[in-house]
Amino acid sequence: MNLPNKITITRIILAILLLILLVFPFYQVGVEFPTYYIASKIALNLKYIIAGIVFMIASFSDFLDGNIARKRGIVTDFGKIMDAIADKILVNGVLIVLAVNGYISVIIPVVIVTRDIVVDSVRMASAGKGKVIAAGWLGKVKTVCMMIGISLLLFSNLPFELWNIRVAELLIFVATVLSVVSGCQYFIANKDFIFAEK
């Protein structure tokens, strides 16, 4: 297994550990994470600090593995599949948890997951007919906005929360809109492959 694939597998492990950290009922086993207050009004729980650090490391690994694979010319089908799985577990999993906990609207993960299903279906249909679809620039911008937005949200939107500027929510909203737009672009650009008769 090459280095990029090892990094991808590590990201999957980090994503799973992150989700366990966020959803496990630690209070039921007598574990309580301390809450720190910034400027006497902004609450920052240690659990979310740890989650934010893990999420940022995992997000950076997403950039790292692809960059190494392209530079060294060792892009593999296994790597492509596992990279997509890692991204879905990391981003979609955290979005669902944040929605359940009331940090974001439940509409956001519904839209993101639906978009991913549409895009993945289009990719599979196109691949079955010999066309490989590369990720568009809008999709890449969406990913960057989403990862930065989630990171900020896990850190209580600091430092922007000090000035009551909702940067985290704004970035996640922008990422959601871009997700829909890029999903529509995928569909329109490949509709001939989707509806073509065999």
Image (tube, rainbow, N blue to C red):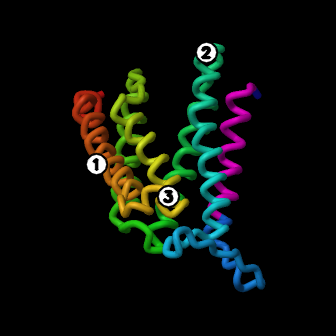
Query: Could you say whether the residue bearing mark 1 is in a helix, strand or loop?
Result: helix
Circle on res. 50: none
Q: Is residue 105 above or below residue 130?
A: below
The one of 137 and 195 positioned closer to us in this rendering: 137
Q: Is residue 7 above or below residue 92?
A: above
Estimate the x, y position of residue 28 in percent, counting from the top left. 72, 85
Query: Could you say whether the residue bearing mark 3 is in a helix, strand or loop?
Result: loop
Q: Residue at x 62, y 67 (%)?
A: 22
The one of 180 and 175 positioned closer to us in this rendering: 175
Is there CB contact under 8 Å for labels 2 and 3?
no
Q: Is residue 137 above or below residue 145?
A: above
Q: Residue at x 66, y 68 (%)?
A: 46
The one of 80 and 124 positioned closer to us in this rendering: 80
- The residues tagged by marks 1 and 3 sit, at their Cα atoms, a distance apart of 23 Å
Whether residue 117 is in magenta: the answer is no
In which image quadrant can residue 178 be found?
top left
Tell me the residue that label 1 is attached to: 177
Circle on res. 71: 2
Q: In terms of sequence position, does the residue under pointer 1 or pointer 2 come before the other?
A: 2
Q: In terms of sequence position, does the residue under pointer 2 or pointer 3 come before the other?
A: 2
Circle on res. 158: 3
Tag 1: amino acid: Val
Tag 2: amino acid: Lys
The span picked out in magenta is 2-19
Q: Residue at x 50, y 58 (%)?
A: 158
